[in-house]
Amino acid sequence: MGTIRIIEFQPEYEKPVKDLIHLVLRSLGITNKYPEINRDTDLDYILEKYKDRGRFWLALKGKELIGTVAIEEKDNNIAKLKRMFVLPEFQGTGIGQKLFDTALNFTKNNGYKTLRLNTDKIMNRAHRFYEKNGFQKIGEDDKRLFYELDLTPNHNQE
């Protein structure tokens, strides 16, 4: 498949990031179902939103953007996994795991105790991925499922 690099966000990738995320959401029918998803303002301010104890990473094959993931600080103990997207043609190739591992290592190295996320109910493949990586479902609403991962060192993950 060629060399895949995970790098921190760089401003020249702002439009490709938006294009990739919206392409993946469209491929799942989510943007048609929930048009408000296109108004996520964090994508207009990535460097400001994901700084300090947050980060935004890109998966690149050569110079081609093929995936994204981000960590947002909620408080001193809780981080939120965000913007976990991989182009459909690269799903199932380990890119998502590589992105997730980068984000997970960052949260552990920055002293977070809990990692949370939410995902659309129709993203079944994502649900399986998160559960395989130790996340527990902690709730849901009409559109989303909410997951949590305990990062404390003594927590026994199955």
Image: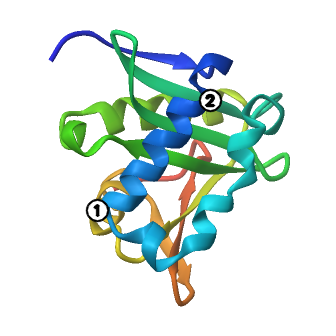
Query: Which is nearer the eye, 43 or 49?
Result: 43
Residue linked to disc 2: 14
Residue 28 at x, y percent in the picture: 32, 65
Residue at x-position 51% and y-position 82%: 143
Quadrant where the N terminus is found in the figure: top left
Query: Which is nearer the eye, 66 or 127?
Result: 66
Residue furthest to the bottom: 142
Does residue 25 appear left or right of residue 35 in this picture? left
Query: Which is nearer the eye, 129 or 32?
Result: 32
Q: Hey, which quadrant is residue 131 in on the image?
A: bottom left
Residue linked to disc 1: 128
The amino acid pointed to by label 1 is Arg
When the figure is inspected, residue 1 is found, relative to residue 79, above or below; the finding is above
Q: How is the image coloured?
A: rainbow
When the figure is inspected, residue 5 is found, relative to residue 34, above or below; the finding is above
The amino acid pointed to by label 2 is Glu
